[in-house]
Amino acid sequence: MTPARPSPATRTGLVRAVAWTLGLLLAFAVVPAAVHPTAARADNPVVQHIYTADPAPLVHNGRVYLYTGHDEDGSTYFTMKDWRVWSTADMVNWTDHGSPLSLATFSWASSDAWAGQAVERNGRFYWYVPVKNRATGRMAIGVAVADSPTGPFRDALGRPLVENGEIDPTVFIDDDGQAYLYWGNPNLTYVRLNADMTSYSGSPTRIPLTTAGFGTRTGDPNRPTLYEEGPWVYKRNGLYYMVFAAKCCSEFIAYSTAPGPTGPWTYRGTVMPTQGSSFTNHPGIVDFKGNSYFFYHNGALPGGGGYTRSVAVERFSYNADGTIPTINMTSTGAPQVGTLNPYVRQEAETIAWGSGIETEPSGDGGMNIGWIENGDYTKVKGVAFGAGASSFTARVASATGGGTIEVRLDGPSGTVVGRCGVPNTGGWQTWTTVNCPINGATGTHDLALRFTGGSGYLLNMNWWQFAPAQP
Ligand SMILES: [Ca+2]
Ligand SMILES: [Ca+2]
């Protein structure tokens, strides 16, 4: 599908810079050398191979699906053309599901694939996004629908759902089944969605932006409250929460609560202070497997900043009275929940930390990793080998001389437990399966797949799987 291997020069520079930064950090890390010196501890940002922004998590069937925007490499404005989907079962190993929604999905949209949110209802997935309406030149809210959380999504209406020149939709379905769409900058508006999730009843209604409801901003007579944009509405223990980007610029994350979905709102203070070298931030909150998680974005990747952002996540606990504690950005991220099973097929694009790789839609189905050069690697965390693995299988393709997959425990410089050669297969999307013996992989370890070979691109990988040693 990409026979010419177009060189993502900026991206390659980015990931190389990540690797360099990690190397520098490791070089100066005060860690006993005997303790896996190359096991990178960082799990934030969630994605390393592209810039991501405006997180919207959704819990479905034992996974967190993360819907994000996508900042173009080297961007100097909010130049955004598509949205991305990622998912995880353990909060650290994230699977790249590619881009099932883009500006091209909306025939009436011209630009600005900005911050949206997806929700499930009756087995269908509805993704609300702001885009510029070509006909009016104003920002409008579109809705896309799919039968799977990873799409493909199609335009549900062929026109905007609502349009008032404002952005940042959040969607919430109350316990009684009534759904609400909230959005806006500089105003904050809601409308009651019908059960079909693609039409509404009544008129869009403005939420009064009072200082009691949304805090006091000083220095801007046009914006007397802290509310700026990016609302995220949900309900917990009977209390309604509206988390939002506050003040500008730089933004911080604040929140308000209310006894009902339409208010009255009471300002509750800061969730995340201004941090992280992006002048915007954007909240998303879910509970998953007994924990609460706060998603946000910053400029933490090399080359990162206000227009080249990255989504990150922290675990947190509500205070006993339901208030949200102050949450700080970390490079550590959320701890892993559970382990990864190496004895079932795992996608190559399931990654805790990647260096030098890219992803693309695969002719073999789903996504594959590619643009792999000598020394590039992927790492997954917490792989439960148990009594031991006997062999490793990988689905691979190569239009060049191929290379070697080094199977390493704990990190890209960790113990080699196997080496798999990958031959020329006749094309970047001409797939074959390679297999090699494994020795010494027992217990639970991080796993690095490190790629070695000559110059240029070596191979693509779609998936991998270990076989257990016979008892
Ligand atoms: Ca590369
Ligand atoms: Ca795959």
Image (cartoon, grey):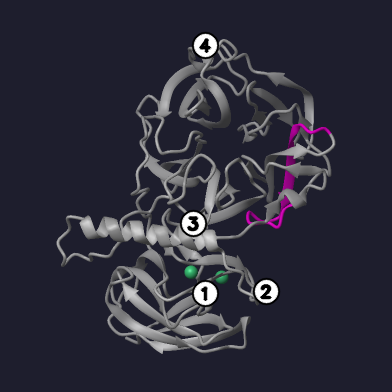
- Residue 167, position as x, y percentages in the image: 66, 32
Up/down of 182 relative to 292, above or below: above
* Residue holding disc 1: 463
Up/down of 98 relative to 293, above or below: below
Disc 1 residue type? Trp
- Ligand 2, image quadrant it occupies: bottom right
Which mark is in front, 1 or 2? Answer: 2
Depth check, front residue: 273 or 271: 273
Return the disc, 1 or 4, that comes first in the chain's sequence: 4
Return the disc, 1 or 2, that comes first in the chain's sequence: 2
- The CA span between labels 4 and 2 is 55 Å
Disc 2 residue type? Met
Q: Quadrant of residue 354?
A: bottom left
Q: Which residues are magenta?
A: 136-154
* Residue holding disc 3: 88
Is residue 60 shown in magenta?
A: no
- The CA span between labels 2 and 3 is 27 Å
- The reply to whether the residue tagged 1 has its Cβ within 8 angstroms of ligand 2 is yes
- The CA span between labels 1 and 3 is 16 Å
CB of mark 4 within 8 Å of CB of mark 2? Answer: no
Return the disc, 4 or 2, that comes first in the chain's sequence: 2
Depth check, front residue: 386 or 446: 446
Return the disc, 2 or 3, that comes first in the chain's sequence: 2
Is residue 148 shown in magenta?
A: yes
Mark carried by residue 25: none
Mark carried by residue 1: 2
- The CA span between labels 3 and 4 is 38 Å
- Residue 375, position as x, y percentages in the image: 39, 73
- The CA span between labels 1 and 4 is 53 Å
